[in-house]
Image: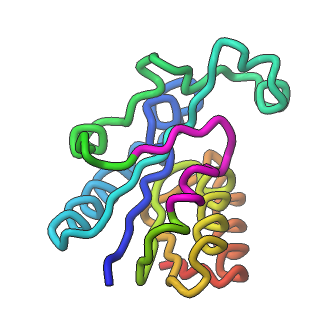
Amino acid sequence: MKKCLIVVDFQNDFVSGSLGFPKAAELEPHIVRKIEEYRSRGDSVLFTFDTHGDDYSSTQEGRNLPVAHCLRDTEGHKLYGRVGELALDSDLRFIKNTFGSDALYEHLKTESFSSIELVGLVSNICVISNAVLAKTAQPEAVIIVDSKCTASHDEALNTAVLEVMKGLQIQVI
């Protein structure tokens, strides 16, 4: 049975842009290896894109996190570095305006995978949100998060969220 890799929001603004942090850039070679590994086996590689419009500051997220980021059609919205170079036109891409992707959830309900692995940013917000959606969509699939392929601007939050995910029966490797 096929496996699935979901690259969550590995976008310029989260790595080197308005919400970037040093640890995020260190993830790139690990995520690149994962993409290459999945592609070599013929498994699925999916991408999510945090996406906001000019009205960001008037949204609930914008009021709670008043830093414009991942605005549609900007450099900050694009995938970062080699990860962006490895994304194929044929890869499914899920545009989302909140932490979890309802479209990704709906897609995962239509296809069976033996495992679903999530990598990307930010561990304590969008990675955990989409991992829970994957677990909900496919409760019998093994859901995996590689700790070398995700991070948060706050190391204590990153450590805590990895523990929370273990409690949700998500394999943290």
Q: Give the residue at the far front of this rendering.
A: 110
Q: Is residue 154 placed above or below 66 in the rendered structure?
A: below
How did the renderer colour the structure?
rainbow
User: Who's the residue at 84% across and 30% down the image?
Assistant: 60
Q: Quadrant of residue 169?
A: bottom right
Q: Is residue 7 placed above or below 139 in the rendered structure?
A: above
For the residue pair 141 and 112, the one nearer the viewer reads as 112
Q: Is residue 91 placed above or below 105 in the rendered structure?
A: above
Residue 136 coordinates in the image, percent (x, y):
66, 72
Residue 124 coordinates in the image, percent (x, y):
67, 56
Q: Quadrant of the N terminus?
A: bottom left
Q: Give the residue at the far top of this rendering.
A: 54
Residue 79 coordinates in the image, percent (x, y):
38, 36
For the residue pair 159 and 149, the one nearer the viewer reads as 149
User: Who's the residue at 72% across and 82% down the image?
Assistant: 167
Residue 7 in the figure: left or right of residue 85 = right
Residue 149 in the figure: left or right of residue 18 = left
For the residue pair 72 and 160, the one nearer the viewer reads as 72
> In this picture, which residue range is highlighted in magenta?
93-107
Q: Give the residue at the far left of this rendering.
A: 40
Does 103 appear in magenta? yes
Does 75 appear in magenta? no
Q: Is residue 90 placed above or below 148 in the rendered structure?
A: above
User: Who's the residue at 27% across and 44% down the image?
Assistant: 87
